[in-house]
């Protein structure tokens, strides 16, 4: 098989397996097995591509012309490869976790859940491999639509309301800003291809560049840049596997990935730093980092706190793009991977706590650490990674982002990053601390009322939940030691225009 | 024989359905009348296809009615633009008729059905005639044929709801006012030029130059056609007419009648008056442009608050007419192209949506949105078609709605009309609200107790899905429609003497 065939396979395996999942709807074991197998197959396909891409190959395939000059086409470059590996790799973990969670929590309509989940992964991979903005936009919208039923999964009034906010913000930003931005680029550049060094240099009047960048920065609603971040906390009504994979990895990372991609391959880092078009974005991202962290401090709902933490962490990546230098792009891309592994662990822990103890509030977690030690140890490891302490992977991405700030001469941003780490400590570490060290309250308050097990019978979550948590927690540590290879790989992201076209 | 048919294709286009109409009335039974109508429509479609193929390369077919030479005799003149519109009209009729069999049997009593089909054929005759003829007065005659039969068709909705009678009466008054304006306008042009042939008119008006009579003629024609195409604020007849007409009629006239009026407007604006007519350019930019934008917003906002699905879609149609008018006020190739392509795209999309509304009426007896709660589970196929066509109305990529929006925004950006581009997108956000309100009600609300709703019959579902599928097909392979629209726009432009911007 050629690389382009494998590329298409990677995108279409998740989409194709939906039919199988639908057909097996009445046999849950086979259905869930199919979903895990599809995840593994997709990951293998993506890994097969990794080798050639590391050696410098750029597999590409053009499917057909949708409108004159606008092709549905795919092409792989290091940044997209990274996102694809992260998304498809973590899909396996989540697919296993979903089995434990969905059955443990007794969720309904699981077939619909798995179908939408698979389509969403297909959308994420489509985004990762898209060769031009047009293709990217198509898959961006597919991702939005396919995740809507997942957010609304419970069909309760709260779920409907959350899903409405979700769809409203994501669609509004993408149609009102992003699409206008794309048409603008098409109008002045005559192409939407992602090219090394950007396609706008010499075509866009530098005084307009900040406005075009604003259309993209706000239009990519999935990047959750303030003030368009409300959809992310709203999406927390979804079952936890959705929050874990989609709203910590696939959807939000698709957003910041698009941001990095636009910065690197549409504007071009050189163009941005030369014109200073992204200076305002540095400060907005910095504000977003700090404000979201402070909001996170005030949330007692575990998933809401994690959601605001995600908003804050996503802005790190936007910041990396806005700093407009190579270190920024590397730090930002690295953060896609390190934050993904860390945050998915945290969310899966939150889900495990819900399944095992039916608790969703941080104030109810007192003393739970002794009953669910593995879950909370994993939580601590992941929290340390998000904070950015060695020996966890998260340390490196912050390190490179600080280097980037220094390169860009933005000393104040280094301060912001440090302050943000302190805030991370303040909102993340109390959670395991309470669980391990606080005495359990005499009469535990159940968020789900009488259905919950009495406090002293709480055990660890089912094995299907626990194993994935351990894998990703170990992943946080592995990333710290394996970062050299990742750094080398990310150095291949072309920053300058190719000299010979 | 074949050569004779080929030579007389333009006449056959109109004559076939016209001859079938009285025969239909004499057949006495619904099924037989339907079968004859189906044959006539199939033939009309075949003729339209061959005319389209014949004109695709830019040929202009000129046909002399009764062999009388123009400008004395009536000329039928087919170029790529009206061949395209003919194809749309007869194509939509081809989809509506299979649908109409079950729907009409459900909504109209047996003894009236032959008359219904004969009125349907007359309406089709009128619409095709307006499109194909090259004679101004002939346009008026056919416009009246189509309008009078439409009044009758709408009034047949009285068996379901008596308000159809007032709706039809209202439309009769407004339509007649419009037709009168139109014919007075033509009278003024005749006063100046002494001819009624469109091509001849164009030439003599160019020689004659500007005058007060010409201006009056222009304004009368604009208002007359504006009434027919429901240009805001001349749209008052439309919501009631669409809501109370039988489902099949709504689907047919919503997809064709306003489109034909748009075609007449395009023909008069750009073939007869010509682009270089300053008064026209000023009117379009200072009167029609603001009205179009107001329509896009006002009608969409009203649509958001409707409880009846058909009424909501009717208001949405007024907004969509706004897009088509907006496209022509740009006075540019891309703008005209956007208008022509939206004419097709909206016909397909809105046809599908009104057919879905008809399916709901058939199965649930109502199209009130609040009574559609949970209908997504009872009628999965119908509701899924609504989602697909609804996404197209919103303008998501890979649907026809996206293609229209793309070219509209592109046309606005080419002229550097930023605010207009943003307004186009902002108004399409309103479509998200009113479409998603229905989707949410249909899927996420619990069904009311004790209501039995069964999926619509296959012969209603197939055409509905046919149109929904077309809206995806032509959104994915838009090269076909864009090429036709682009050539049609070029044909309009080259026919006029305007100095191109």
Image (cartoon, rainbow, N blue to C red):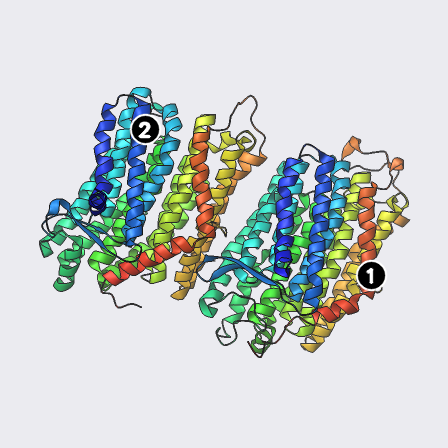
Q: Which mark is residue B35?
A: 2
**Residue drawn at point x = 79 percent, y = 55 percent:** A428
In the rendered image, the residue lying farthest to the front is: B1
Q: How many labels does the image show?
A: 2
Numbered disc 1: secondary structure: helix
Decide: is A140 above or below A106.
below
Q: Which chain carries label 2?
A: B
* Front one among A388 and B355: B355
Locate residue B118, reporting x and y percent. Answer: 26, 30
Q: Quadrant of the C terminus of chain A?
A: bottom right
Q: Quadrant of the N terminus of chain A?
A: bottom right
Tell me, yes or no, whether the two marked residues, 2 and 1, touch with CB atoms within 8 Å.
no
Q: Residue A478 carries which label?
A: 1
Q: How crowded is mark 2: few (under 14 residues within 10 Å), some or many (20 or more)?
A: some
The answer to whether tags 2 and 1 share a subunit is no
**Residue drawn at point x = 61 percent, y = 76 percent:** A496
Locate residue B482, reporting x and y percent. Answer: 39, 56
Left or right, residue B307 beside residue A234: left
Locate residue B364, reporting x and y percent. Answer: 47, 26
Left or right, residue A324 beside residue B362: right
* Front one among A294 and A14: A14
Q: Which mark is residue B158?
A: none
Decide: is B316 above or below A252.
above
Name the image quarter holding residue A79: bottom right
* Front one among B226 and A67: A67
Of discs 2 and 1, which sits in the foreground?
A: 2
């Amino acid at each position: 098989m050629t690389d382009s065939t494998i590329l298409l396979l990677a995108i279409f395996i998740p989409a194709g397996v939906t039919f199988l999942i639908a057909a097996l709807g009445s046999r849950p074991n086979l259905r869930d097995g199919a979903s895990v197998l599809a995840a593994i197959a997709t990951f293998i396909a993506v890994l097969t591509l990794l080798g050639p891409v590391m050696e410098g190959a750029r597999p590409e395939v053009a499917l057909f012309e949708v409108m004159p000059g606008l092709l549905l086409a795919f092409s792989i470059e290091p940044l997209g490869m990274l996102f694809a590996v992260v998304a498809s790799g973590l899909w396996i973990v989540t697919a296993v976790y979903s089995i434990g969670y969905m059955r443990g929590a007794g969720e309904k309509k699981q077939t619909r859940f798995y179908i939408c989940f698979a389509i969403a992964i297909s959308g994420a991979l489509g985004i990762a491999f898209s060769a031009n903005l047009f293709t990217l936009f198509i898959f961006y919208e597919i991702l939005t639509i396919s995740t809507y039923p997942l957010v609304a999964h419970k069909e309760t009034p709260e779920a409907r309301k959350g899903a409405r906010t979700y769809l409203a913000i994501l669609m509004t930003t993408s149609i009102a800003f992003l699409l206008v931005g794309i048409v603008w680029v098409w109008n002045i550049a005559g192409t939407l291809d992602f090219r090394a060094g950007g396609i706008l240099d010499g075509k866009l009047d530098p005084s307009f560049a900040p406005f075009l960048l604003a259309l993209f920065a706000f239009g990519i609603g999935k990047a959750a840049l303030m003030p368009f971040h409300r959809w992310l906390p709203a999406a927390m009504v979804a079952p936890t596997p959705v929050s874990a994979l989609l709203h910590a990895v696939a959807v939000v990372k698709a957003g910041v990935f698009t941001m990095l991609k636009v910065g690197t391959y549409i504007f071009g880092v050189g163009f941005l730093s030369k014109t200073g078009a992204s200076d305002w974005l540095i400060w907005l991202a910095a504000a977003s980092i700090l404000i979201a962290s402070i909001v996170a401090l005030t949330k007692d709902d575990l998933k809401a706190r994690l959601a605001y933490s995600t908003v804050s962490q996503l802005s790190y990546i936007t910041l990396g793009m806005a700093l407009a230098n190579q270190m920024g792009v590397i730090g930002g891309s690295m953060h896609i991977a390190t934050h993904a592994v860390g945050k998915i662990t945290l969310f899966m822990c939150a889900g495990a706590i819900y399944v095992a103890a039916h608790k969703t509030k941080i104030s109810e977690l007192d003393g739970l650490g002794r009953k669910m030690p593995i879950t909370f140890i994993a939580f601590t490891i992941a929290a340390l990674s998000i904070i950015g302490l060695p020996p966890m992977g998260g340390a490196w991405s912050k390190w490179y982002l600080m280097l980037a700030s220094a390169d860009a001469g933005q000393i104040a941003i280094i301060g912001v990053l440090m302050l943000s780490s302190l805030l991370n400590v303040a909102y993340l570490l109390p959670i395991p601390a309470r669980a391990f060290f606080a005495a359990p309250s005499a009469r535990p308050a159940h968020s789900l009322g009488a259905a919950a097990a009495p406090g002293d019978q709480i055990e660890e979550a089912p094995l299907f939940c626990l194993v994935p948590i351990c894998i990703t927690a170990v992943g946080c540590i592995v990333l710290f030691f394996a970062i050299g290879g990742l750094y080398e790989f990310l150095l291949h992201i072309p920053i300058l225009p190719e000299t010979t076209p | 024989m074949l050569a004779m048919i080929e030579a007389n294709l333009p006449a056959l286009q109109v004559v076939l359905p016209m001859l079938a109409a009285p025969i239909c009335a004499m057949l006495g039974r619904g099924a037989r009348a339907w079968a004859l109508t189906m044959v006539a429509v199939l033939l009309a479609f075949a003729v339209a296809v061959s005319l389209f193929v014949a004109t695709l390369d830019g040929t202009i077919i000129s046909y002399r009615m009764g062999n009388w030479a123009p400008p004395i005799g009536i000329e039928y003149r087919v170029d790529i633009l009206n061949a395209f519109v003919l194809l749309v009209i007869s194509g939509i009729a081809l989809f509506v008729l299979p649908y109409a069999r079950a729907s009409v049997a459900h909504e109209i009593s047996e003894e009236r059905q032959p008359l219904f089909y004969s009125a349907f054929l007359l309406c089709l005759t009128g619409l095709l005639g307006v499109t194909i003829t090259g004679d101004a007065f002939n346009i008026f005659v056919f416009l009246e044929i189509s309008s009078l039969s439409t009044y009758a068709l709408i009034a047949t909705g009285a068996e379901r709801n008596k308000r159809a009678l007032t709706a039809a009466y209202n439309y009769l008054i407004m339509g007649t006012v419009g037709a009168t304006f139109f014919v007075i306008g033509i009278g003024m042009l005749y006063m100046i030029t002494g001819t009624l042939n469109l091509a001849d008119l164009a030439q003599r008006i160019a020689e004659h130059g500007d005058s007060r009579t010409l201006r009056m003629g222009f304004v009368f024609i604009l208002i007359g056609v504006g009434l027919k195409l429901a240009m805001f604020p001349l749209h008052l007849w439309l919501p009631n007419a669409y809501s109370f007409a039988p489902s099949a009629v709504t689907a047919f006239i919503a997809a064709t009648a306003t489109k034909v009026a748009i075609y007449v407007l395009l023909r008069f604006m750009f073939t007869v008056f010509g682009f270089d007519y300053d008064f026209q350019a000023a009117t379009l930019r200072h009167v029609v442009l603001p009205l179009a934008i107001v329509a896009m917003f006002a009608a969409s906002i009203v649509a958001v608050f409707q409880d009846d699905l058909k009424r909501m879609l009717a208001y949405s149609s007024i907004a969509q007419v706004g897009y088509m008018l907006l496209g022509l006020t740009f006075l540019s190739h891309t703008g005209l192209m956007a208008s022509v392509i939206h004419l097709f795209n909206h016909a397909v999309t809105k046809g599908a949506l009104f057919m879905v509304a008809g399916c709901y009426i058939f199965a649930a007896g109502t199209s009130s949105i609040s009574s559609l709660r949970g209908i997504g589970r009872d009628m999965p196929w119908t509701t899924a078609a609504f989602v697909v066509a609804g996404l197209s109305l919103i303008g998501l990529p890979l649907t026809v709605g996206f293609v229209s929006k793309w070219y509209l925004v592109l046309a606005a950006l080419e002229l550097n009309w930023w605010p207009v581009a943003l307004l186009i997108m902002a108004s399409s956000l309103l479509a998200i609200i009113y479409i998603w309100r229905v989707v949410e009600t249909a899927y996420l609300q619990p069904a009311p107790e004790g209501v039995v709703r069964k999926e619509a019959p296959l012969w209603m579902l197939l055409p509905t899905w046919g149109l929904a599928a077309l809206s995806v097909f032509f959104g994915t392979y838009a090269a076909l429609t864009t090429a036709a629209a682009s050539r049609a726009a070029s044909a309009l432009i080259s026919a006029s003497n305007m100095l191109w911007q």
